[in-house]
Image (cartoon, grey):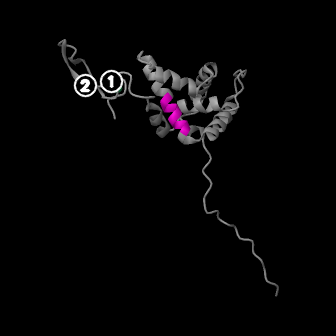
């Protein structure tokens, strides 16, 4: 009786990383991924293009890698937060231009990511991550002391304010 060779399924020692889903990415991460993707600068959005945009998002995310994607999105969020507070430092401006040398593309990627997010939900975990931010260099408001001196409203009805140190409004007073 001939020996029978049985082809066995070999389980790889390292399981391949699960495919990335767009739902696992926050809106900010989607924008960074689009910026890093093959999305052409001349691209014009048309109805029904969501699958195409999502494919670019996945491409960009895989290209950048999740760790760097998350960090870049968080630093971008910190930049926007500081800009909204009119507290941008030279360090932040420089770092932002290093991250996104093409400002027009960066703005466009943000608009397109927002369009995708209208119809492609963000997972709870990614949504929470999207609320976090990082700052380039020390906090422009408190210089990383995490506290600012200001007048705090104790009771708005009683018009009661007190001055003192409290958590920095820009960095959230977190180390
Ligand atoms: Zn601060």
Crowding near pointer 2: few (<14 within 10 Å), some, many (20+)?
Answer: some
When the figure is inspected, residue 140 is found, relative to residue 25, above or below; the finding is above
Is ligand 1 less than 8 Å from the beta carbon at label 1?
A: yes
- The x and y percentages for residue 41 are 70, 22
- The x and y percentages for residue 90 are 47, 20
Nearer-N-terminus badge (2/1) = 1
Task: Indicate left or right for 173 with 72 as reference.
Answer: left
Q: Nearer the viewer, mark 2 or mark 1?
A: 1
Does 3 appear in magenta? no
Query: Magenta stretch?
Result: 68-75
Q: Secondary structure at mark 1?
A: loop
Tell me which image quadrant ligand 1 sits in: top left
Furthest toward the bottom, the residue is 1
Quadrant where the C terminus is found in the figure: top left
Q: CA distance from mark 2 to mark 1?
A: 11 Å
Q: Main secondary structure of the magenta part?
A: helix
CB contact under 8 Å: marks 2 and 1: no
Q: Which residue is mark 1?
A: 142
- The x and y percentages for residue 158 are 17, 13
When the figure is inspected, residue 8 is found, relative to residue 36, above or below; the finding is below
Q: Quadrant of residue 149?
A: top left
Does 70 appear in magenta? yes
Q: Which mark is residue 3?
A: none
Q: Which mark is residue 166?
A: 2
């Amino acid at each position: 009786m001939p020996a029978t060779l049985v082809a066995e399924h070999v389980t790889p020692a390292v399981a391949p990383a699960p495919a990335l889903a767009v739902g696992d990415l926050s809106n900010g991460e989607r924008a960074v991924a689009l910026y890093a993707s093959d999305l052409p600068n001349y691209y014009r959005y048309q109805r029904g293009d969501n699958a195409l945009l999502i494919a670019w998002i996945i491409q960009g995310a895989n290209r950048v890698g999740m760790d760097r994607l998350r960090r870049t999105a968080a630093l971008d969020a910190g930049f926007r937060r500081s800009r909204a507070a009119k507290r941008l430092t030279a360090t932040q401006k420089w770092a932002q231009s290093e991250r996104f040398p093409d400002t027009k593309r960066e703005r466009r990627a943000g608009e397109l990511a927002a369009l995708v997010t209208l119809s492609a939900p963000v997972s709870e975990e990614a949504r929470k991550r999207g609320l976090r931010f990082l700052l380039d260099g020390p906090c422009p408001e408190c210089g990383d002391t995490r506290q600012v001196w200001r007048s705090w409203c104790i009771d708005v009805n009683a018009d009661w304010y007190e001055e003192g140190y409290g958590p920095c409004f820009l960095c959230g007073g977190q180390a």
